[in-house]
Amino acid sequence: MTQSISHDRTEENLEAKAQWFQTLSLAERMDLLCEFTELVLENNPQVVEVGRAQSSTGRVCVLSGA
């Protein structure tokens, strides 16, 4: 199987994204974190004013759109 670059969103899945992310160095991962943080703050500066999340004492159910 030859690997190639695809631009089809239907071929994106969490496993592929995780594999790509794991290929990045720690510095590259931190750069992405900073870029995402700046993006969020530029588009929604009030996000820092939101209170802290509360812990859940019950069960947590994870849903997947697969």
Image: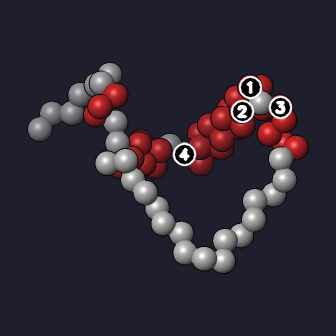
Label 4 close to label 1 by CB (< 8 Å)? no
Q: Is residue 34 visible?
A: yes
- Occupied quadrant, residue 8: top left
Kindly give the residue lying farthest to the front in the view shown: 58
Please name the residue that numbered disc 3 is placed on. Answer: 45
The residue under the point 11% across, 38% down is 1
Mark 1 touches mark 2? (CB < 8 Å):
yes
> What residue sits right under mark 1 in the picture?
43
Total label count?
4
- Where on the picture, by quarter, is residue 37? top right
Q: Secondary structure at mark 4?
A: loop
Three-letter code for the amino acid on which mark 2 is drawn: Val
39, above or below 13, in the image: above
Foreground: disc 3 or disc 4: 3
Q: Residues within 10 Å of mark 3 (few under 14, many from 20)?
A: few
Q: Nearer the viewer, residue 47 or 28?
A: 47
| Residue that appears at 66% across and 77% down | 57
